[in-house]
Image (cartoon, helix red, strand yellow):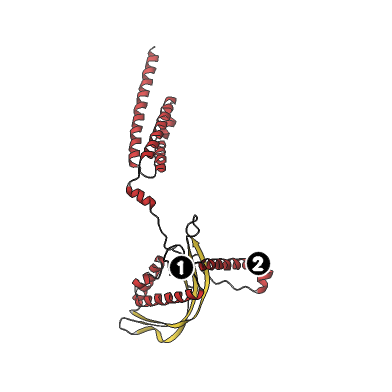
Amino acid sequence: MALLRSNAIRNLSKLSRIQQHSFALGSSRSYSNAVISGPQGNSCSSNSFSYKSHNYPLICGRAGVLRSSMAAELSVFLCEARSLSTKAKAPPQGRAMGTMQVTMLSPGFIYEPYAPREPISFLKRWFTRSGWGRTKEDMIIELKSAYAISKLRKFGYSKQGFYKEAFEIFKEINTSLAHGDKTSLRKLVTDKTFSVLKNDIKNRETMWSTVYWELIEPAVKIRTLRARLIGVDRNDLKKVFIQLTLEFLTKQKFEAYNSEGTAVAGDKNKEILVRDIWVFEKSLFHPGAYWRLCGRILL
């Protein structure tokens, strides 16, 4: 009898400790609900995970009565969490941020930058397996450009009109670089290119005090090397940017001066033939979008 009495007392003591532990977990659970905020679905799952992670070792280490108690607690807790998450409302700031749309002004990179293709002989191109593969690659490259140009024509593109506009941008950017005019430069280029050009101006000013630059018009030659479309929304195929890579062959005059006004580089009386490869970019879904320089390619 004494043995049975001592076992009964021990079981009652364990049950008392279990109930106290359950209440402690309940208070911890309430505190977690108070500090976690976010979307409704995430609120419930986050609290559930927090509850499981704290209590999993206890579930494995206790007796069967503890498992039953914890299972009951878990079901009650999940119901409470769902009820709280469905009733909770996001603050006005959160609702405003949820409806805010972020607009991309530029992809920030040159997609498939142009690089000259290595010449291949006629016999190798048409009578070898590697030549067939090379021909296939060349055809895909040209088809991508043709598709991008055909897409652009729907927005009023004309080759001569674009060349005229691009040449004006080319002249304005080079003039702004020569004068160190960052304000005028800012609206002509993308954000990433603006950072690059600012560093170019800074490095040049450490070498020379001022520079003279002149563009001889018209350009000797302008041609399109590549055209690419960049989609930014897989659910809306109309949200695309287009990049056109142009080659400018122009005659220019250049001369650099030190702080004393003495010419230290170049000669403004001589014309030099310069080849530049610039990539222009434009959004096809932003109202009022215009062409900007998004990068220069050095070969």
Q: Position of residue 222 (x, y in %)?
A: 50, 77
Tell me the element at label 1: strand
Location of the N terminus (image quadrant):
top left
Question: Which residue is pictured at 34% across the width and 30% down the height?
Answer: 23
Name the quadrant containing residue 117: bottom right
Mark 1 or 2, which is nearer the eye?
Answer: 1
Q: How crowded is mark 2: few (under 14 residues within 10 Å), some or many (20 or more)?
A: some
**In the displayed structure, would residue 228 be above or below residue 28?**
below
**In the displayed structure, would residue 90 be above or below residue 2?**
below
Amino acid type assigned to the residue bearing label 2 in the image: Trp
Q: Where is residue 19 in the image (x, y as percent from the top left)?
A: 36, 26
> From this viewpoint, which residue is outermost toward the top?
1
Q: How crowded is mark 1: few (under 14 residues within 10 Å), some or many (20 or more)?
A: many
Q: In this view, does 111 lie to the left or right of 2?
A: right
Labelled disc at residue 143: none
Question: Which residue is pictured at 31% across the width and 81% down the height?
Answer: 259
Labelled disc at residue 132: 2
Upstream in the sequence, badge 1 or badge 2?
Answer: 2
Q: Is residue 136 left or right of residue 284?
A: right
**Residue 285 can be seen in this image:** yes
List the residue tagged with mark 1.
Answer: 281
Amino acid type assigned to the residue bearing label 1 in the image: Glu
Q: Nearer the viewer, residue 133 or 259?
A: 133
**Mark 1 → mark 2, Cα distance in angstroms:** 33 Å
Q: Position of residue 282 (x, y in %)?
A: 45, 67
